[in-house]
Image: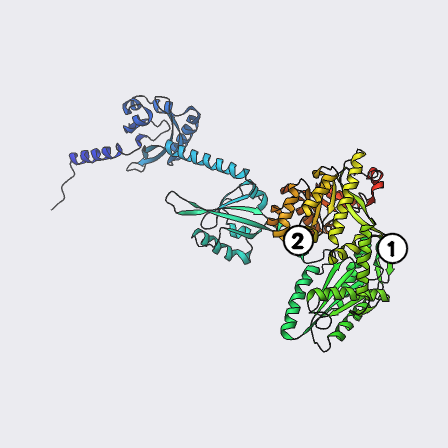
């Protein structure tokens, strides 16, 4: 049965349905002529809600539509419409329209051609959508992002935002500076492909995935960052998860701090805690640790241990004739020679000055003495070949003392003490001598004699103070005078503290010696004060003095008795002494500070400070160990440590004092580093009180 023909009412129904549909969607629809004039033939009633003009008004007035287009956009819109009509392509544009009340709307228009049965476009139909709310939201989002970016740019740290795949979404200005790229170059770049070395890439991606999944052990970590020039920086990251409104993780914000120099400085400081900065050999602290381990193993396994104490003969002649720099080069050459003679299981250490220690472990008890003496003789023979330093040839011998565990010593302290005593026995017998410790020889008599003579020196006022200036390195301006004790021995002449202060500490005389030095210093400070000269002064405290009950009261009473302002006095204690027993030294130093007397840490960097402990102490000055400055002008590692300590002191509200300034190059380096204070032979040698004023006048400015 044939299908009935479509009737006119059917077409009318379809048109009605179409009109109902287009007039209820949230957009304006229209039909227009497909020519450059684009006269409207139909526009849906939604146009009144958009522009405030009814559809009839727009159909009756051909120009009203274009009068509603924002004047600044009209020329662009008309030009694009005419071109699409000429070139027969669909028109799409975003522009602004102004409604009858003057309100501006952002609109998006899409227009397509309607082809007749001959394929000719005689009509166009289009849709206009008000996108003002969308554009407002986007603008607010951009503004919020810009504000966030400005805040992030103010941060001193690098900020990198990553999506779950590791793609960079945002980098702040500090980040671009660190990463070596121009701003805007990195958005959309894969972080791990660009900045992580290939061997670490898989691990980095895995850590990022665990972080986003909440499975990472910690959100703070350090990682190497590969830069465009091939160099690597160590960055400490703190990561925070970013979530959407529903709580779903959308990425991570990573705040990074470049700690490359800090880590290098910390490693250098940690190394120097157990190594001699000049020769690179283990220092006494590391040897002491190995010695205890060797003795424990020897007791357990029935083995023997020997300690050799070596002191160079006539080394002082090198320093006196060619200077300390040449002496340092000679010590470096000596260390290399001695290293060549040791076994792989032996430990060679520099005790300090021109003294070295060699620890021989795992010896056969039956032949331990013979093995130790043979090793000592080998060291002496190895040094007999002349050294060439600064173009001059030197013959440097050595005196070696030997002590053997199980033979003359039964613990580490006795082994060290006996090796030292044996070395003095060898020195007394002549050059290039080796001696095994012999307790029956003159050591007890020597110690008794030294004790008696030192007591007499204190009683008869044979101790004197020499004063070394602490100055501003750029101007030579005096900031303090350090009191350095000397012994005017009637027999030997002027004796430096290195020869009698350690002995005083060992025998317990250090407390009387310390009290006497405080008295001498306060007496001289008062005399200067009466003459109108009022410098700050600094005094050195030994570790044993710091542990003495009544120390603070005794010092305070002496200062008060001479009518001196306590703030003009500073007490110096070595870094190792301050840190070895913090439970005892910390309270003592705080009590000292409470009296108004200032506290200084001496030889900072020679030991291994805990920064947490340092922060807790009432320290005003950090005196940087001279070894760093000695190497700094030519050694980048030493310069980095020196820089780090100066900055550390500044950050902690302390003043750094560089010790051992002997050359103009060293002083210029300190000026460049803005080190506030310095002392050394270039800036003023230790001098008697009577010479201080004239000596200060000779301190040169840079």
* Front residue of this view, candidates 644 and 481: 481
Mark number, residue 269: 2
Q: Is residue 232 left or right of residue 373?
A: left
Residue 386 screen position, x and y as percent: 85, 64
Residue 618 visible, this angle? no
Residue 358 screen position, x and y as percent: 73, 66
Residue 448 screen position, x and y as percent: 80, 61
Label 2 sits on a secondary structure element that is helix
Query: Which residue is identified by label 1?
Result: 492
Residue 427 visible, this angle? yes
Q: Determine the image quadrant of residue 562.
A: top right
Residue 293 screen position, x and y as percent: 64, 67
Label 1 sits on a secondary structure element that is loop
* Front residue of this view, candidates 483 and 308: 483
Q: Which quadrant, please, contains the C terminus?
A: top right
Q: Which one is earlier in the sequence, the residue at label 2 or at label 1?
A: 2
Task: State which mark lies toward you, 2 or 1.
Answer: 1
Q: Which residue, as the protein is rendered here, is positioned at the far bottom?
A: 366
Mark number, residue 686: none
Residue beneath the point at 40% across and 34% down: 137
């Amino acid at each position: 049965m044939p299908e009935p023909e479509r009737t006119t009412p059917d077409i009318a129904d379809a048109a009605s349905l179409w009109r109902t549909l287009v007039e209820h969607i949230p957009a304006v629809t229209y039909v227009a002529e497909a020519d450059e004039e684009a006269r409207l033939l139909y526009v849906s009633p939604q146009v009144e809600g958009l522009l405030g003009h009814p559809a009839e008004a727009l159909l009756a007035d051909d120009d009203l539509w274009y009068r509603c287009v924002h004047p600044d956009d009209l020329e662009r819109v008309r030009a694009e419409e005419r071109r699409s009509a000429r070139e027969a392509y669909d028109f799409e544009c975003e522009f602004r329209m102004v409604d009858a009340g003057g309100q501006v709307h952002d609109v998006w228009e899409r227009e397509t051609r309607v082809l007749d049965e001959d394929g000719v476009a005689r009509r166009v139909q289009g849709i206009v959508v008000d996108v003002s709310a969308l554009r407002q939201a986007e603008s607010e989002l951009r503004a919020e992002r810009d504000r966030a970016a400005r805040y992030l740019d103010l941060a001193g740290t690098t900020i990198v935002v990553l999506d779950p795949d590791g793609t960079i979404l945002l980098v702040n200005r500090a980040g671009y500076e660190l990463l070596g790229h121009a701003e805007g170059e990195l958005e959309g770049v894969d972080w791990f492909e660009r900045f992580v070395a290939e061997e670490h890439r898989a691990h980095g991606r895995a850590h990022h995935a665990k972080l986003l999944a909440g499975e990472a052990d910690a959100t703070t970590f350090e990682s190497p960052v590969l830069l465009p020039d091939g160099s690597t920086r160590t960055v400490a990251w703190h990561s925070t998860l970013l979530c959407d409104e529903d709580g779903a993780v959308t990425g991570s914000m990573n705040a990074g701090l470049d700690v490359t120099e800090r880590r290098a400085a910390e490693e250098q400081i940690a190394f120097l805690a157990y190594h001699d900065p000049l020769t690179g050999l283990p220092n006494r602290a590391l040897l002491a640790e190995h010695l205890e381990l060797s003795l424990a193993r020897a007791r357990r396994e029935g083995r023997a241990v020997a300690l050799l104490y070596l002191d160079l003969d006539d080394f002082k002649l090198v320093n006196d004739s060619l200077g300390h720099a040449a002496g340092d080069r000679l010590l470096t050459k000596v260390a290399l020679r001695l290293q060549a003679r040791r076994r792989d299981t032996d430990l060679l250490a520099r005790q300090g000055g021109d003294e070295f220690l060699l620890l021989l472990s795992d010896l056969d008890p039956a032949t331990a003495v013979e093995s130790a003496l043979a090793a000592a003789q080998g060291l002496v023979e190895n040094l007999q070949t002349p050294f060439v330093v600064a173009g001059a040839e030197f013959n440097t011998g050595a005196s070696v003392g030997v002590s053997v565990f199980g033979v003359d010593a039964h613990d580490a302290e006795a082994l060290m003490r006996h090796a030292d005593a044996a070395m003095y026995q060898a020195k007394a017998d002549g050059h290039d001598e080796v001696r095994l410790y012999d307790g029956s020889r003159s050591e007890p008599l020597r110690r008794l004699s030294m004790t008696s003579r030192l007591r007499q020196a204190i009683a008869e006022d044979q101790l004197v103070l020499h004063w070394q200036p602490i100055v501003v390195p750029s101007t030579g301006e005096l900031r303090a005078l350090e009191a350095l004790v000397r012994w005017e021995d009637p027999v030997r002449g002027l004796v430096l503290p290195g020869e009698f202060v350690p002995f005083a500490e060992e025998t317990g005389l250090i407390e009387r010696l310390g009290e006497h030095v405080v008295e001498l210093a306060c007496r001289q400070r008062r005399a200067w004060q009466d003459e109108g000269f009022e410098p700050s002064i600094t005094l050195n405290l030994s570790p044993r003095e710091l542990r003495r009950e009544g120390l603070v009261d005794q010092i305070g009473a002496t200062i008060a008795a001479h009518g001196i302002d306590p703030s003009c006095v500073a007490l110096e204690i070595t870094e190792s002494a301050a840190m070895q027993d913090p439970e005892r030294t910390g309270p003592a130093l705080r009590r000292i500070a409470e009296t108004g007397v200032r506290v200084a840490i001496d030889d900072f960097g020679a030991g291994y400070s805990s920064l947490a402990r340092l922060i807790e102490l009432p320290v005003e000055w950090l005196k940087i160990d001279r070894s760093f400055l000695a190497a700094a002008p030519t050694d980048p590692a030493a310069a980095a440590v020196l820089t780090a300590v100066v900055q550390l002191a500044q950050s902690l509200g302390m003043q750094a004092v560089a010790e051992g300034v002997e050359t103009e190059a060293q002083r210029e380096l300190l000026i460049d580093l803005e080190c506030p204070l310095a002392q050394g032979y270039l800036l003023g040698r230790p001098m008697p009180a009577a010479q201080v004023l004239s000596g200060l006048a000779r301190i040169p400015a840079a």
